[in-house]
Image (cartoon, grey):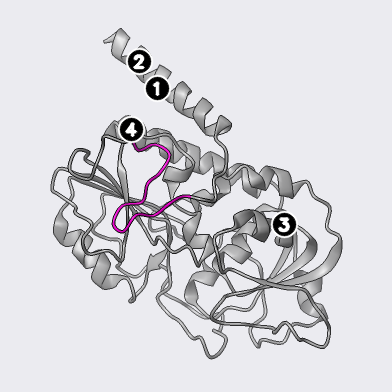
Amino acid sequence: MIKRIYLKILHKLKSLLQYFNRKSNSSIVIPPEIIDDSFRKSNHSSATTNLKFIFRADKTNVGDWWCPPWRYFQFKPGVVGDIFNPEFKISETDTLILGGGGIGSETFRPHLNRIKEAKANVSILWGAGVDSLLNRDGVLSDGEHDLYGNYFDFLDEKGIRVFSSPQKFNYVPCASCMNNLFLKYREKKPRNKVGVYNHKRVSILNADNPQRIPIEDNSGDNIKEKLEFLSDFEYIITNTYHGVYWATLLGRKVICIPFKSGLFSFKYAPTYCLDGSVRDEHFERAVAYEGVLEESRKINLDYYFMLANKYDLV
């Protein structure tokens, strides 16, 4: 008994050390059906491991690409699949870790239903979000939005990036906060006043704007490039989830123009511009929060250790 406890402690310490020593890698290769990741051994396949990870494997959306927990934590050998891939097999003996990303929406409901019907032995949500309402042609009002829906009710463990009062599920921020680049870029001093970070499909400002405000968007998979941009400004105006989240982790002041309900689900809320016209009053109300990076990392580490111990994931 004592030996088993000792070995578990050693596993946890090893995992923690590997996490802190781990390097960021922006060139992960995606075969047609399985994403090859850093913990997967060459002699393992979806047929020989019961640990499965599913997320939206979209290299054209930097937030989606860097949100899954397998990028930051040590697990025993497993395989990773795209939630959009119907050929990715899930069996009743599997332990499934789902997330992160904004996969709680009607777009993803058929894929979530497929996962539900597979009846995995254990199903875990990690840092995913919900967008129950979407308006790409306008701005949402700050009314009562359904921040949860019923997308994830079937899962055994529900670690969700949605924060509310009262809290319905376990609050676990997006695991991308574990990327060590945040430690570097948070220390960078802003060189400019205002930057705009667009959603790639819903622009709030064009590159040829008369004020010549610098613009970036959430396209691609280069997180270093995005954090370099976000950290360059005192204020970030954005309409993307990770634009708000990452700028907040970096200690920047954030003004959000919301077009989807998930943008109202932050624990550390940005200043909202609800008519699409950013004015002096928005800059005056915007605040830089302290300690959000440390808190978000701690919550993710606590969640990891709880799951690893409960489900023997390491």
Q: Are marks 2 and 4 in contact (CB under 8 Å)?
A: no
How far apart are the alpha carbons under marks 3 and 1? 35 Å
Q: Earlier in the sequence, mark 3 or mark 1?
A: 1
Q: Quadrant of the C terminus?
A: top left
Above or below: residue 152 compared with residue 93? below
Above or below: residue 156 compared with residue 281? above
Q: Are marks 3 and 2 in contact (CB under 8 Å)?
A: no
Q: Assess disc 2: are there few (<14), some (14-19) or many (≥20) residues with their C-alpha within 10 Å of its C-alpha.
A: few
Above or below: residue 77 compared with residue 32? above
- Please tell me whether mark 4 sits on a helix, a strand or a loop: loop
Residue at 67% across, 58% down? 225
- Please tell me whether mark 2 sits on a helix, a strand or a loop: helix
Write the start and end of the magenta stretch as one range. 28-40
Q: Amino acid at mark 4?
A: Lys
How far apart are the alpha carbons under marks 1 and 2? 6 Å
Q: Is residue 34 magenta?
A: yes
Q: Earlier in the sequence, mark 3 or mark 2?
A: 2
How far apart are the alpha carbons under marks 2 and 4? 14 Å
Residue tagged by mark 2? 7
Q: Are marks 1 and 2 in contact (CB under 8 Å)?
A: yes
Residue tagged by mark 1? 11
- Please tell me whether mark 3 sits on a helix, a strand or a loop: helix
Q: What is the residue that sits farthest to the bottom in this orientation?
A: 137
